[in-house]
Image (cartoon, rainbow, N blue to C red):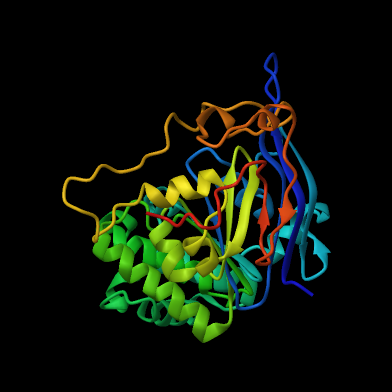
Amino acid sequence: MSLLDVRDLSVVFQRRGERPFTAVDKVSFTVEPGQTVGLVGESGCGKSVTSLAIMGLLPKRGNKVGGEVLFDGTDLLKLRPNDMRDRRGREISMIFQDPLSSLNPVIPIGVQVAEVLERHQGRDRKQALREARDLLDAVGIPDPQRRLSEYPHQISGGMRQRALIAIALACKPRLLIADEPTTALDVTIQAQILTLLKQLVDDTGTALVMITHDLGVVAGLCDTVNVLYGGKVVERARRHELFAHARHPYTHGLLNSVPRLDSPRGERLHAIRGSVSDNIPWTEGCAFAPRCDNVVDACLEGPPPLEPTATGGDLRCNNPVSEEVTVR
């Protein structure tokens, strides 16, 4: 049995006087114990909303969530709020995108790490602070004893992100969701955080869902990759297969837009034309059609199905990139 089995997850936002907006449209994927699964796509494709729906952190009003999110056989979407709070932080944890806004600015770092242990492990404050110091040390924060009494604004962005990781890992969760944890960090710190996450997954066997738009992160961390566009999965493949033979024009475009060290000097990047807002509803056809160089008449006649490929992945495309065409 999969540790996490997301089946036809949908999230529709509705404001009074406005048309409903479907942010996540029947997304399905699985995560095995100890596996790292990537959710990839541009901003606005539904990655973060998917993670918030899984964690039960979407607002109570103004949205409608459908489908199933099975964690170890239990549908998280049907749990009562108190039951979900018991699981959140203990069995399922999340590293948020912006560490400065995710940490409470008026509470010391040590207390914020310790309160997770007090809530879920029944530790008293003194014992929880000792364990918090060990956690800060484990994630690579120097002089962890001194950092316990410091506030978020007193430490660097890299240390804040490490503190968030310490909070997420305090109870040794079975599933960790990382929502673009390196976005606001410089390149050197990004590499350190990714190395830390990879080491923690290898050492503890925790399953990891990595949400990112950075294909370099995917290349170094993920086992299986789900490419999202317009709230739907358009391609799913093992990491090496995806990078060697991307079939969906959107995935192919994402890979070709990444600068390469072996490219001739002065060569222009092959960027995807338009923006993520240049799409059509999935009910009318392929949402990527207005930006696609491989568009055919069938792309505008209805939504293409997600079909299995010969290499064990899945593809949603009427006119995919030829298998002979490799990424530039």
Residue in the image at 58% along x and 31% along y: 289
* Spot occupied by residue 107 in the image (x, y as percentages of width and height): 40, 57
Residue 281 shows in the view: yes
Residue in the image at 54% along x and 27% along y: 290
Residue in the image at 65% along x and 44% along y: 317
Query: Is 199 positioned to the left or the right of 186 in the image?
Result: right
Front in this rendered view, residue 39 or 235: 235
Residue 115 shows in the view: no
Residue lying farthest to the front in this orientation: 324
* Spot occupied by residue 26 in the image (x, y as percentages of width and height): 74, 45
Residue lying farthest to the top in this orientation: 17
Residue in the image at 73% along x and 49% along y: 306
* Spot occupied by residue 268 in the image (x, y as percentages of width and height): 26, 42
> Quadrant of the image for the N terminus?
bottom right
> Quadrant of the image for the C terminus?
bottom left
Front in this rendered view, residue 281 or 78: 281
